[in-house]
Amino acid sequence: MKTTYKIVQQVFLGMILVVSLVSCKKFLDIKPETDLTTGNAYNSAQDIENAITGAYRAFYYEYYIWDNVLLSDVRSDNAYAGGGGDQPILAYDELNISTGNNRMLADWSQLYIGIGRCNAILNKIDAIADPLLDKNSRRSQIKGEAAFLRAFHYYQLVKQWGGVPLELNSNSSDPAKTNLPRASEKEVYDQIVKDLELAVTNLPDTYNGPSGSVTDNIPSVNKVRATKGAANALLAKVWAQRSDRDYNKVLQYCNAVIGSPSGYSLLANYDHLFDGDHYSNAESILEVAFIGGNWDVSNWGVQLYLAPEDGWQKYCVPSRNLVNAYDAEGDNVRKSANITYFKDVPWADENWNPCQDNTVSVPFNFKQRHPDGWNSGDRYYLLRLADIILLKAEAQNETGNFTLAAATLNLVRSRVGLAPVTGTSQAQMRTKILNERRLELAFEAQRWDDLLRSGQAVAIMNNLGEVKYTCAGGIPSAPVTINYNCNQNKLLLPIPQGERDANPSLTQNAGY
């Protein structure tokens, strides 16, 4: 298993240096720029179209394919590491991530590569004199797309690491200009908001295939390229997540999404979101459109969650605490859509089946279901409507309207056949909303953010009562309590030491 995973890493590291496509089948015919530097000549509309297509390629990087899920669900109460105890992923589960954790450096680097591609577009596009860019507002749309993508990557950075270097140019090899110190959390969020406000102004509600652009006649482009709805959705999440949060703004942007001319609506069947047959649906705001059967554009991450026939233990194993949460709510619909079970798995699972008893079922993350031998076409939602509806309920509650919050929450509960809730206090509704988000969004890289935003991360992690077992002579040991030793310093990731070695201006987060 470890050998297999190392092969995946090696192939991936080669892939991140190449930009080949993004999002839709039609984009396969477009050859994007491979290096966005000051040496590139951007002379035509097609050059910049290729560049923006290449910028979306960041969603095919390992961070978005699965590491963001590990950093949210494995790091929280939703899942165990699995994988047979592999470091450094086990460190996520144990809340013991070191400054030398090589995955931190890879994630950091991938996000800044994505930012660099956006910077190049935003810095160069106005100098291109091509009438095609001024046809159907395409120049403005590309600016909006690049600004949105840059904001999305910075959002990942700031919520994981806090204040980070605010690089907006990426056009210099001078260390004095590139070795930037960390900006404050507020400065990063303010830049994200600025970019997203530009995106809202410049992006359409839907793409109608304007003549001369790469979006001609691609109906599904509305779900795989940035739109006004995606920018408003991210603004809602940003204003909720930042330390100086503003729930009135959260309400404003949630309402903009819910009332969008794009016509977003909840699917009647929750399972259809993930069955592989209903992508580009009305609930989707933004998704990554992987294409099965082609390594360069397929979703290899699914193979690391499922397929026990491989003979080695998979990752992101659903926790007993999460399973119990579904059972306590009687939420069989979402439980069966998000978790599946296999018996007779050929490995010992220290949390569920330490003695490899073939009568004992082991749960698996089932959010994507078709591994297809490392070549899955299963998609990930980056933004979807249920998240925004639940965020609206949170904002209503935090602004004192807990009765309205209950009504909004029940829109999501009714979809899965659960009885409506009533809130008798703001504190009671706060707990109900946090739990509802957990059940709805498990394995969608939301749980750790929710725990931080609610201020509950330390208390919840330290009071989980999760256990593991050993096996001796075919008999499981007594349960051994897992102690997460969570504290305020562990709420942020460590700045990668490799990055600090390269940039002496970077300071470390507290506790590392």
Image (tube, rainbow, N blue to C red):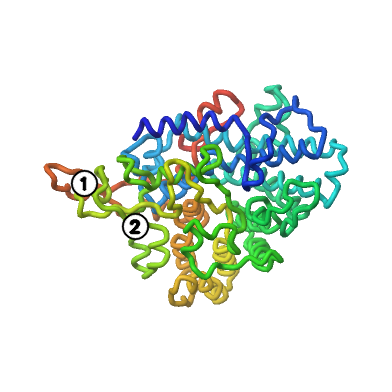
Residue 409 visible to an observer of this rendering: yes
User: Closer to the camera, 408 or 23?
Assistant: 23
The residue located at (19%, 49%) in the rendering is: 357
Closer to the observer: label 2 or label 1?
A: 1
The residue located at (58%, 63%) in the rendering is: 283
The residue located at (51%, 48%) in the rendering is: 377
Residue 257 spot, x, y in % from top left: 66, 63
Query: Could you give the CA–CA distance between mark 2 and mark 1, rounded to whole angstroms?
Result: 21 Å
User: Closer to the camera, 270 or 295?
Assistant: 295
At label 1, which amino acid type do we have? Gln
Between discs 2 and 1, the one toward the N terminus: 2
Residue 82 spot, x, y in % from top left: 34, 44
At label 2, which amino acid type do we have? Asn
User: Closer to the camera, 228 or 424?
Assistant: 228
Outermost residue, top direction? 174
Outermost residue, left direction? 473
Asked if residue 423 lies left or right of residue 345, the reply is right
**Up/down of 30 relative to 331, above or below:** above
Q: Element type at marker 1?
A: loop
The residue indicated by pointer 2 is 321
Q: Residues within 10 Å of mark 1 (few under 14, many from 20)?
A: many
Residue 434 visible to an observer of this rendering: no
Asked if residue 468 lies left or right of residue 486, the reply is left
Q: Which mark is residue 356?
A: 1
